[in-house]
Image (cartoon, rainbow, N blue to C red):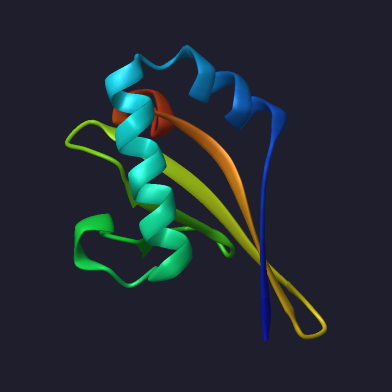
Amino acid sequence: MTRRFRSTRKFDKQFEQLDLKTQKQAEKALELFISDASHPSLRYKKIQGTDNFYEIRVNRSVRIIVEVTSEENDQIKTLYIIGIHDSVFPPK
């Protein structure tokens, strides 16, 4: 199975708006995610009530939302959004 990674324009904009320290933390989390998505520090898990969306923990307050889809023998992971937990997961 081939794995491909891409990001949305929204993700790219949100990433650029993060402070430098958080950007570095996010880059580290993404490198880890690409090499080993099951690493415990990422707390990679499926978002309840969705079919294809998962969250990655960058630090105590920042999350990355990833959409995972499959096409033939490819698994595509799209970096969907990044932000503070409460902005990524609005209150119900």
Q: Quadrant of residue 25?
A: top left
Q: Position of residue 29 (x, y in %)?
A: 34, 48
Q: Quadrant of the C terminus?
A: top left
Q: Position of residue 59 (x, y in %)?
A: 22, 38
Residue displayed at 36% across by 59% down:
32
Q: Nearer the viewer, residue 70 or 40?
A: 40
Above or below for 80 versus 48: above
Above or below for 17 versus 40: above
Q: Nearer the viewer, residue 13 or 89?
A: 13
Instruction: Please give left or right for residue 26 compared with residue 52 in the image.
Output: left
Q: Nearer the viewer, residue 14 or 35?
A: 35
Residue displayed at 27% across by 68% down:
39
Residue 47 in view, yes or no = no
Instruction: Please give left or right for residue 45 compared with residue 65 in the image.
Output: left
Above or below for 11 versus 17: below
Q: Quadrant of residue 71?
A: bottom right
Q: Work out which residue is located at the far right of the displayed protein and give it.
A: 72
Q: Position of residue 78 (x, y in %)?
A: 64, 52
Q: Quadrant of the N terminus?
A: bottom right
Instruction: Please give left or right for residue 45 compared with residue 82 in the image.
Output: left
Residue displayed at 38% across by 71% down:
36
Q: Nearer the viewer, residue 21 or 84?
A: 21
Q: Position of residue 84 (x, y in %)?
A: 33, 25
Residue displayed at 58% across by 65% down:
51
